[in-house]
Amino acid sequence: MARVIVDVMLKPEILDPQGQAIARALPRLGFSGVAGVRQGKRFEIELDGPADEAALSDVRKMAETLLANTVIEDYAVRVEP
Amino acid sequence: MARVIVDVMLKPEILDPQGQAIARALPRLGFSGVAGVRQGKRFEIELDGPADEAALSDVRKMAETLLANTVIEDYAVRVEP
Amino acid sequence: MTDSVERAAQTPDEPQPYAELGMKSDEYERVRAILGRRPTASELAIYSVMWSEHCSYKSSKVHLRQFGTKAPKSDALLVGMGENAGVVDIGDGWAATFKIESHNHPSYVEPHQGAATGVGGIVRDIMSMGARPIAVMDSLRFGALDAPDTRRVLPGVVEGISSYGNCLGLPNIGGEVLFDPCYIGNPLVNALCVGLLRKDQIKLATAPGPGNKVVLFGASTGPDGIGGASVLASATFEEESHAKRPAVQVGDPFMEKLLIECCLELFEADVVVGIQDLGAAGVSCATTELAAKGTGGMRVDLGLVPLRDPSLLPEEILMSESQERMMAVVTPEDIDAFMAICARWDVPATVIGEVTDTGRLVMTWKGEVIVDIPPGTAADEGPVYERPYHEPAGQSALNSDHPARLPRPADLRATLLDLLGSANLASKEWVTSQYDRYVRGNTVLAMPADAGVLRVGEVMPGAENTDRGIALATDGNGRYARLDPYAGAQLALAEAYRNVAVTGARPLAVTNCLNFGSPEDPEVMWQFAEAVRGLADACRTLGVPVTGGNVSFYNQTGSTPIHPTPVVGVLGVLDDVRRRVPHGFTAPGLKVVLLGD
Amino acid sequence: MSAARVGVVTFPGTLDDQDAARAVRHAGAEAVPLWHADRDLRGVDAVFLPGGFSYGDYLRCGAISRFAPLMEELIPAARAGLPVLGTCNGFQILCEAHLLPGALTRNQGLHYVCRDQRIRVENAATAWTGGYTSGQEILLPIKHGEGRYVADEATVAALEAGGQVVFRYLGGNPNGSINDIAGVSNEAGNVVGLMPHPEHAVEELTGAPSVDGRGFFTSILKRFVNL
Ligand SMILES: Nc1ncnc2c1ncn2[C@@H]1O[C@H](COP(=O)(O)OP(=O)(O)O)[C@@H](O)[C@H]1O
């Protein structure tokens, strides 16, 4: 059994209201030194088998069609070390 | 300027309906071989300065008090390579 | 290098991408004639968006005039067509403003954000009249329920409306959900908002008084929805990085909620001379329209516009469709009070210019003049087309095809079950349960009633003097309109009118959203002309004026248009809202009476 | 006797503050507006945290609000016995502020749900339920996307044993909440949170088809009259 991680983030040019709201709140909470925050999603996919090329290509397809909305989001797939 | 990543996931014992819904949808979409999916959050924090120990300790505090609700969530902080 | 007015004068023959921006060559020539030179890139940006079908109504204008010329006399009408939204007198010193608008295409591209920003846009229209938005409705049409793309579009649209409207605290008090294969690839997402205001506090989009400040407030400006502007950027600058800009706008309902509360405090403090929301054409539209309706001149430093992406070029700033922004005109004496109220609500606000009496809209960028135009030529004097139209081939064949020709169903029971289970007749609770119908505590009737009804008396401070209520319904039937657009539009009005009337309300005014195919197709144009004629005639007969609305053309896949779909909203008033008539049989033993034939 | 003064808190993005104030007034108490940015409880006798989407529900519902200056006053006051009621977003804020145990997470059905819900009052001895009887069934609207109450097993067991489960959903759990929990209280019973909206069930004309929410407001009044 292997674990694959898919990170999904809004494309850089797309407004991220959540990240902005967090960034605006930070100084009030006493945190300084933060230039920006962006919030995205993280998926942990447990595979039945090993994370071989075939499985990864499946996960990539899954990310492309289901986990990310590629109109506004980018994704990255990686194997948990 | 450095980027620090905070991953926040529901604790394993807490039900994750979003992950479950995805896992249930996968076979219908023709994906097999997935034993489970969990969905969490990923924060990208841009620092004004370098990701030194002081800054990381600040981010850890931020994760502990704001970004994660430790009643139900675990978090991990790491510097983007 | 900035394409300044000076540079434009020196390079009269520089080729410009007007065609890519959707301008015809005679339209471009008219701009050159107006300016006496070639437009700068920024001026071209302004004219191309302001003269687009969407902003200028160039194909529909000649027909829509009937709503004015045939309008019945109405004492209730305070503000008619042409403003951000119509305003009607509901009595006791109070007025209601309401309007319906489409966000069809964006909702197909990105259902959640498209529908969400559709709600956001119509709510800002209502705010810009000086009103508190008090409820929303949504009228939706999708392809067949079991079509694969409907699985993508329907949940996204409903979630978008739900997340945005719920977060604003606006009860959703009604709407429609209909399915027909003709909408596959062209879902219709029409959102309606209604607001309340004191009759004597109507705000208009106007910038009078030289020396008054022009303030941009709300969200910062990003590269949202400026896919089209990239041709300008790449034509002038050959810069790769500007070639790919997102066509999708993302909404921030929380910012919009802050904007609502902020605007209401601004109105209450009486520190606003004129106000305009930033809709499809963003800063271009707000500046030209405010200036054109005011003293006639305005000076703006585009470099002062707060940016989310510092790499934006002036023409991109002008075309940006970033959401949750408003523009206000404020006297110098009131500017501090204005800014303090914005700060209290955490709403960023920036003075970006000043009203002048020069009759020119002048914009600068890094010290150079990049726009110098008579604002009315962009805002009001766009092209007007008398598009050719004729009855579609096969229209009379379609009409002579009679249901009597169809085979009689053998099994009535199965037929009834089929009907009950069909998507268009089944319960819409899957949709309506995702909408908050109770928030703000003034909802008297909502789902499953035929019309939404709201109590006015506690909507805002001061309204306690009235027992009145308002009722609203939207209806439309594309299949009827396909068979006969004249009668179809009238049926839509009649249905909405009835739905309002059965709550006990007196119907007062009409808004409409006209969803059609391409106006360049003479058969579609015929459908449009007939529908408008039908609606205008019916409004005269029923004595209710059209106060505003929206036209959405180009709803077609390839050359196949959707059914002509006029959606009609009717607003009525109840003198005493406690006497509303609820929906359904309320007690056993009551007599059931059928009215009409 | 001067009327009891119930503070109604407004955060940026709060929606039900006006309804909450109306419900307080209908019960005969005075509604005192409290602003998130003020470090001042204005001497109120009780506090109502109404529903809405404070800070847009961004990050997590209630996560940003709980750091408001007003909360710095409210948290110690609540620990010292001030009656505090949180409905919906108010409940979420109370959990985030650790005034109530557990947390509220995404509905199991993944959709926002607005409907009229039957609820059983399990404990009529809290500051906000004295006007009901234990076991009484009431009808209140719910309207939320993140109302699934969760807590670890030990916490849930302690809540059940200590009578801190104040409300339970009847006739179908709308969000997958553990043990059908609709609302809980702290150990002392002065802090109560629930997902349903009593303030939308106080008038015949508007809101849910019930006036069962009135009991919350008469409960708190009775408490002060009896003091
Ligand atoms: N998209 C929608 N948004 C809000 N309310 C809706 C929507 N669609 C339907 N409704 C409401 O649901 C109820 C039932 O709708 P519908 O089944 O179309 O009834 P009818 O056939 O009587 O018009 C009505 O109160 C209607 O206003």
Image: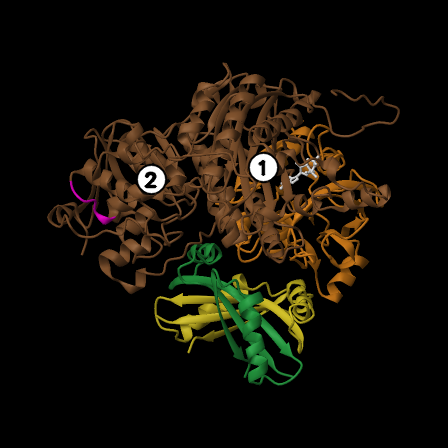
Chain colours: A green, B yellow, C brown, D orange
The mark found on residue D26 in the picture is: none
Question: Mark 1 CB in 8 Å range of ligand 1?
Answer: no
The reply, left or right, for residue C274 in relation to residue C519 is: left
The reply, left or right, for residue C129 in relation to residue D146 is: left
The mark found on residue C50 in the picture is: 2
Is A48 magenta? The answer is no
**Mark 2, other Cα within 10 Å: few <14 / some 14–19 / many ≥20:** many
Q: Disc 1 versus disc 2: distance between alpha carbons?
A: 31 Å
Q: Quadrant of the N terminus of chain C?
A: bottom left
Identify the chain of the residue marked 2, using the numbered disc in the image.
Answer: C
The residue at which mark 1 appears reads as C482
For marks 1 and 2, the one nearer the N-term is: 2
In the displayed structure, D105 sits above or below C212; it is below
The local secondary structure at tag 1 comes to helix
Mark 1 residue type: Arg
The image shows residue D89 at horizontal and vertical percentages of 61, 48
Q: Quadrant of the C terminus of chain C?
A: top right
The reply, left or right, for residue B43 in relation to residue C236 is: right
Closer to the camera, C46 or B42? C46
Mark 2 residue type: Met
User: Pointer 1 and pointer 2: residues touching (CB < 8 Å)?
Assistant: no
The local secondary structure at tag 2 comes to helix
Closer to the camera, C392 or C444? C392
**Residue C401 in view in this figure:** yes
Question: Mark 2 CB in 8 Å range of ligand 1?
Answer: no
Closer to the camera, A21 or A50? A50
Q: Of helix, strand and loop, which mostly describes the magenta segment?
A: loop
* Of the two numbered discs 1 and 2 in the rendering, the one whose residue sits closer to the viewer: 1
What range is drawn magenta here?
C37-41
